[in-house]
Image: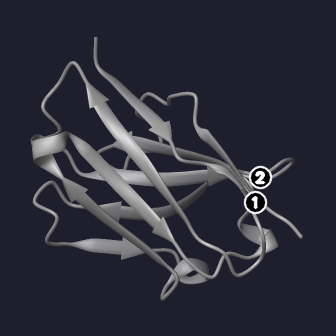
Amino acid sequence: QLQLVESGGGLVQPGGSLRLSCAASGFNLDYYGIGWFRQAPGAEREAVSCISSSGDTTKYTDSVKGRFTTFRDNAKKTVYLQMNSLKPEDTAVYYCVTDCDPLAAWGQGTQVTVSS
């Protein structure tokens, strides 16, 4: 069964950092680009970042550029989202998907809450 599992969320103060992980189970992560999306309460899902299968190419939505970095360790079958200088508006459930495709299967996500 192909599955991506997100982890690493939590409660953090504004200006703080978190590192999210997206682990693959049942398939070879090497072949897939991986996208991070987020959804805040009452809002639509938003694309956050995308990393190519090789890790050579990354893309970010404007609101996180310079603060978030996505990278991957294919040996560990894991893609990461390093989030620095977090803001309250980053509060959301974060999901990772294959091929950076919002129509791909979604996991449970991991909650990120930025609040003082």
Residue 4: x %, y % from top left: 37, 31
Q: In the image as oriented, which residue stretches furthest toward the top?
A: 1
CA–CA distance in space, label 2 to label 1: 6 Å
Residue 60: x %, y % from top left: 44, 74
Name the amino acid, label 2. Ala
Disc 2: CA contacts within 10 A as few (<14), some (14-19) or many (>=20): some
56 in relation to 9, above or below: below
19 in relation to 88, above or below: above
Contact? badges 2 and 1 (CB < 8 Å): yes
Residue plotted at (58% across, 36% down) = 109
Q: What element carries label 1?
A: loop
10 in relation to 52, above or below: above
Look at the image and name its color scheme.
Answer: one colour
Name the amino acid, label 1. Thr
Residue plotted at (28% across, 19% down) = 2
Q: Which of marks 2 and 1 is in front?
A: 1
- Comparing 39 with 113, the one in front is 113
**In this view of the protein, can residue 45 be seen by the observer?**
no
Residue 111: x %, y % from top left: 68, 44
**In this view of the protein, can residue 71 be seen by the observer?**
yes
Q: In the image as oriented, which residue stretches furthest toward the bottom?
A: 66
- Would you name the residue on which mark 1 appears? 91
Residue plotted at (43% across, 31% down) = 5
Q: What element carries label 2?
A: loop
- Would you name the residue on which mark 2 appears? 40
The image quarter in which residue 49 lies? bottom left
Report the quarter where the N terminus lies: top left
